[in-house]
Image (cartoon, grey):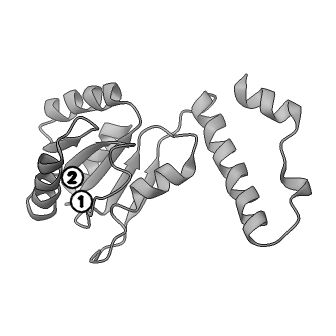
Amino acid sequence: MCIDLIKNAVENGHKILLFSQFTSMLENLQKRLAKEKISFYTLTGATKKEKRAQMVEQFNQDDVSVFCISLKAGGTGLNLTSADIVIHYDPWWNVAVQNQATDRAHRIGQKSVVNVYKLITKGTIEEKIVNLQERKQQLADKVLGGEGIGNASFNKEELLELLG
């Protein structure tokens, strides 16, 4: 599904940020992108600072379609306003990390609407993580909004369900 989404986006002239929390998953996706002859850059924690800045500048100016980025390496310091699609291949338990990654496209200078896709497989731990993220966001909204948080806590059964 991810590759089909990317192929369709590339055919329609979009530039994509593709995030995964696993560098091994990015490697698998890169093999598929290469097979489909879709151009890409890759940024992980192993990417040197100078190379990182160079790739960001190139991506914003050239016709490379996809920037594959490990979630932790791409959370800060990148301005990728040429991208108008963000794909989160797999969720991270802390939604703030994903939001920071998404914000790499939502920067000053962005001229396009940015569409964000989160790919989740039904009936998996990923689906449970997304549900946990939503509950955490609701709890944060209640706390920051000054509402009582008595109804927003997790009970034992809900926590066991998340881990089960």
Q: Residues within 10 Å of mark 2 (few under 14, many from 20)?
A: some
Q: Quadrant of the C terminus?
A: top right
Q: Position of residue 79 (x, y in %)?
A: 26, 64
* Amino acid type indicated by mark 2: Val
* Amino acid type indicated by mark 1: His
Q: Residue at x 26, y 28 (%)?
A: 27
Q: Position of residue 44 (x, y in %)?
A: 27, 38
Give the CA distance from mark 1 to mark 2: 5 Å
Q: Position of residue 13 (x, y in %)?
A: 19, 60
Q: Residue furthest front?
A: 49
In screen coordinates, is 39 left or right of 122?
A: left
In the image, residue 14 above or below residue 48? below
In the image, residue 123 above or below residue 119? above
Q: Quadrant of residue 94?
A: top right
Q: Residue at x 26, y 67 (%)?
A: 81
In screen coordinates, is 18 left or right of 64?
A: right
Q: Residue at x 30, y 73 (%)?
A: 112
Name the residue beneath numbered marker 2: 10
Is label 2 in a helix, a strand or a loop? helix
In screen coordinates, is 145 left or right of 15?
A: right
Mark number displayed over residue 127 = none
Q: Residues within 10 Å of mark 1 (few under 14, many from 20)?
A: some
Q: Nearer the viewer, residue 95 or 63?
A: 95
Q: Residue at x 76, y 57 (%)?
A: 139
Q: Quadrant of the N terminus?
A: top left
Name the residue beneath numbered marker 1: 14
Residues at badges 1 and 2 in contact (C-beta under 8 Å)? Answer: yes
Is label 1 in a helix, a strand or a loop? loop
Q: Nearer the viewer, residue 153 or 39?
A: 153
Q: Nearer the viewer, residue 43 or 127?
A: 43
